[in-house]
Image (cartoon, rainbow, N blue to C red):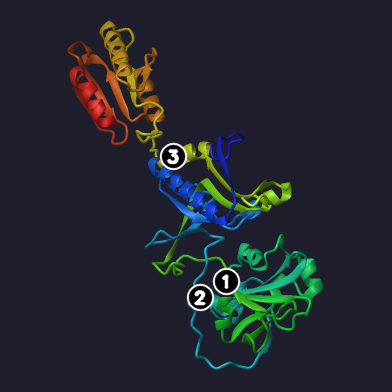
Amino acid sequence: MLRGREFLMKDAYSFHETYESLDETYDVIFNAYKRIFERCGLNFRAVIADSGAMGGKDTHEFMVLSDVGEDIIAYSNESDFAANIEMAPVVSNYEKSTEAPKSLEIVETPNAKSMQEVADFLKHDLNQGMKAIMFKVDEKFVLVVTRGDHEVNDVKLKNLYEADIVELATEQETKEVVGAGFGSLGPINVSEDVEVVADHAVQYLVNATCGANEDGHHFKNVNPERDFTVTQYADLRFIQEGDLSPDGKGTIEFARGIEVGHVFKLGTKYADALNATFLNKEGRAQTYIMGCYGIGVSRTLASIVEQYHDEQGIVWPKDLAPFQVHLINLNVKKEEQVELSDQLYNQLLNSGVDVLYDDRPDRAGVKFNDSDLIGIPYRVVVGKRASEGYVELKYRESGEQEDIHIDELQKHLKNLLA
């Protein structure tokens, strides 16, 4: 259901004269979406996101927490902060070692290409190494340096340069530029044609290791600024579990999420492309400022099922269930059961209760299994005690059941559904 070829989408667009007006509408729709997902009973987070190809400045995704989710969410364990992992900023709270800088030294590192292999070979912790990766940023070569235990975040790199395209350089391109393959890249003695940028954590390293831009060799006792120059330091890594939350409250934890809604501040990107203008109060042509808002209706439905189910099937929240009551006639050959079932069906419908009526000539076990699978909140079974006016009422969520007289049934159901 999450990746069906057909899906339902609720789309909305807003058009504005000022960015202040866009901000107001964005907040209104953002809060409306929050209320919708809250009323659906979903465990979700509104997360800071990357606008990607949509363009624009500010955007939030509404992510339902689920183990089958396609995205990773970074959230605080003590506040409402949440962000897509690509967009979560990292708090720079590193401490520099008081160790005295040592002389730079080049060493052979045969068959050691990954950061872990180099760390094991040189007998140091992973966080004492420097990782260097070559990117092409709008066709310009950029060498990005992070600490060995960190991963480069290409979305942050793209936003740093306000670039259109960021992609990894091929190994052949890398060799042509610096003379070495992927396993031996480093920031020392790099061509002037290559810009070197580094994550904030790098400037706190003392006597670290890095590739020597010579296959099978690495430098020891590397110290930033003394041994190489960085064009700029920036937040260029993925946030990790245990990092401080960017809002200063608690630490970061990860969860998987299913995207069910998205809101964008598009700005003038599409209006500019289409020359979409209006006459403002002064009678002058002005470009529309746009917002875009969407909910994946069928994805929301699938997400609800992911969060509300058990081994038997779906457990619909009562406000979202396709029916409120599942009425089952256990034996269609018994006249008293048929009469009572038909009577209850009509009474419940007339009182405004949505009822699914199972009067199939199937065995009781088949009907019960199907009932649990469909997951309607309340099941009313007309069986052996029909002649006495008693039916069985089962609660799908808890599994509890009780015998109840038909004179009390309707009032009891109304209280449950209120």
Question: Relative to 159, does residue 61 appear above or below in the rendering?
Answer: above
Give amino acid for label 1. Asp
- First in residue order: circle 2 vs circle 3: 2
Q: Nearer the viewer, mark 2 or mark 3?
A: 2
Residue at point 44%, 38% (across, down): 305
Residue 368, x across and y down, in percent: 35, 24
Q: Are marks 3 and 1 in contact (CB under 8 Å)?
A: no
Marks 2 and 3 sit apart, C-alpha to C-alpha, by 38 Å
Q: Please state which of residues 105 and 151 is positioned toward the viewer in this rendering.
A: 151
Give the residue type at disc 2.
Answer: Ser
Disc 3: which residue: 304
Q: From the viewer's perspective, is residue 202 above or below residue 266?
A: below
Residue 364 to residue 247: above or below = above
Q: Quadrant of residue 146?
A: bottom right
Looking at the picture, how far across and down is residue 372, in whole percent?
37, 29
Q: Which residue corresponds to mark 2? A: 92
SS at mark 2 in the image: loop
Residue 156, by quadrant, is bottom right
Q: Secondary structure at mark 1?
A: loop
Residue 295 place in picture, x, y as percent: 52, 42
